[in-house]
Each structure stands twice: as C-alpha cells, then as structure tokens.
Amino acid sequence: MPKRQKKKLKGQEWRHIENKKLVYTIYFILRLSVVLMLVAQFFNGNFENVLLCVLTLVLFMLPSMFERRLHIDLPDTLEVIILLFIYAAEILGEIQSYYTNYPGWDTMLHTMNGFLCAAIGFALVDILNREEKVSLHLSPFFMAVTAFCFSMTIGVLWEFFEFSMDQWMLFDMQKDTIINTISTVNLDPTGGTTAVVVKGIQDVILVLEDGTQMPLGLGGYLDVGIIDTMKDLFVNFIGAVVFSAIGYFYVQGRGKGGFAKRFIPRFQHRPTAQTKGPQPGSAPAEPPSKKPE
C-alpha cells in the first residue's frame, strides 16, 4: 500500500478529533477553572468540595472515553452542552451555591437533562435500527416513544438517587420548598379522609425531644422535597417531549433535519486500514498452491 494512502487512512481513524477545536478549547477552559477551584478549596480546608472538583474532572473525560471505546462520534454541539452541563451542576450549582441563590438553576438543568437524555436514547434506537445484525426496525413514532421513555427513566432514577442520599446521608439534594398553604387528612378531627386546608402559614415551630421550641423563621411551612421532585420530573418531561418530537421529524424526513444532527451521536466507520482482508490498491491474494502428493 502506498505510504501516502496509509497516512490518509490513519488520519481518518479519529477524524472527529480534528474537527473539535472548539470542543477542546472549551474543555481546556473548564478544566483549568476546575483545577483552580480545587486548589482554592483545598487551601480553605473544604475537602468535600475538593472531592466534587475531582469528580467533575473525571466526568469531563467520559465523553472522549466513550468516543474512543465505543467508536461513536459525538456532535460538537452535544459534547459542548454535556461539558457545560457538568460544570453548571457540580461547580456552579453545588460549590458556588447557584441552586439556592438562583431558584431557576435546578429547573434549567433538569429540563436540559430531559432533552439530552432523549437525544441519547434516540441515538441508541437509531443505531440499532441501522445495525444489520440486530433485528430491530422501529417506526419513527416508536423511536420517539422509546427516546421519551429512556429520558424519563433516567430522570426517575436520578430522583431515586437524590431521595436515597437525603434519607441515608442527610444531604438535602431534594431542596425543600417554603409554602403558605397545606392540605392534609392528618388534621381531620374525625380521623377520616377529609383533607383539612390550612392557609396563611407564616412560620413553623419545631418542638424537640427535650421540649425545646425552635421557630424556623422561614416565612411559611417547610415542604420536604416532594414539590422539588415533582417539578424536576415535570421539566424533565418537557425536555424529553421536545426532543422526541424533533427526533420524530428528523427520522420522518430521513435525516434532513440539521438541528437534530447536532444532538444525535452516531457510529464511526472504521477506516479500511483497520478492516480485515485485502486493502484497496493491493494485489489480490493468490490461492494457496497445492503440494504434489
């Protein structure tokens, strides 16, 4: 095989890397920011945040690792959003307290999570649909339904994880909500199932085991997690529905939609140099000669 042709094939093996200067630039900036944050948190003695920074650096490596190990090509737009999503959730959300300082921060991330997970789910089904070795051929509608279900499953599993951490580790990952009205059957004087509505709640007083009373002073009743969980699932639902609809029209139009392509990973075709058998331009293999008996 000519040297020039070999060199060309070698460059085609990871052709997606050559086109990802923007991704690498953003990756470098975010990684440098996390390293500086890690050093600052270490000298401040906040070792929990140091572990969060280490976790963030590990998560940053996952997209590239999946590309190399699974031979898939992540579109630049999808990869950039994944990197920004990780940074926004771990560094800005947790360490910089964006979750508490900006009420819509968690909602934005969960909406984006529903959107991205639907894109990944859609890509998995699309890849299986095109794989000749797999007898799976779903219509565009059922591909969209599968992507939606995949996204919602990831969202539910994440809420299970948050609930488990709150119960076992007392982390309060399911952020509490302050409300001024409650409706509960526990206050029914007859012990029945009639909900009693209490409005205008301005404060809650906790009575501890030793009889000590502690007013919370939060301006209302403290809802423990359920409103946050249902809101997260609802916005995850919105994100999943939006991309499932986009993916449906993308497949219906036989891949003509440019917007959906930016979010759907696809398998890479290995270069001919890696495939078995005779190479292009090489002489055909001669049949083995039979020895005279």
Image (cartoon, rainbow, N blue to C red):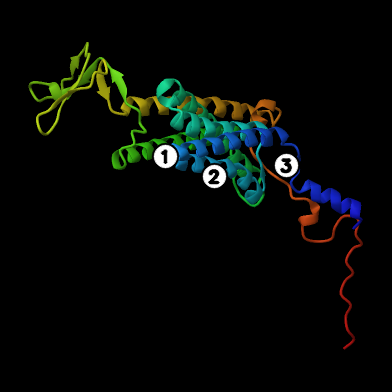
The reply, left or right, for residue 256 in relation to residue 186 is right
The amino acid marked with disc number 3 is: Ile
Residue 7 position in % (x across, y down):
85, 51
Q: What's the mark number on residue 45?
A: 1
Q: Can residue 214 be seen in this view?
A: yes
Secondary structure of the residue carrying tag 2 is: helix
As drawn, the residue found furthest toward the top would be 200
Classify mark 3: residues with Cα within 10 Å, few (<14), some (14-19) or many (20+): some
Q: Which residue is drawn at 85% across and 48% down?
A: 8
Distance CA(mark 3)–CA(mark 1): 38 Å
Of badges 3 and 1, the one in the foreground is 1
As drawn, the residue found furthest toward the bottom would be 293
Residue 153 position in % (x across, y down):
45, 37
Q: Which image quadrant for residue 82?
A: top right
Classify mark 2: residues with Cα within 10 Å, few (<14), some (14-19) or many (20+): few
Tag 3–tag 2 contact (CB < 8 Å): no
Ranked by sequence position, the earlier of labels 1 and 2 is 1
Up-down relation of residue 65 to residue 183 (above or below) = below
Q: What's the mark number on residue 58?
A: 2
Of badges 1 and 2, the one in the foreground is 1
274 or 88, which is in the foreground? 88
Residue 217 position in % (x across, y down):
24, 18
Q: What's the mark number on residue 17?
A: 3
21 or 257, which is in the foreground? 21
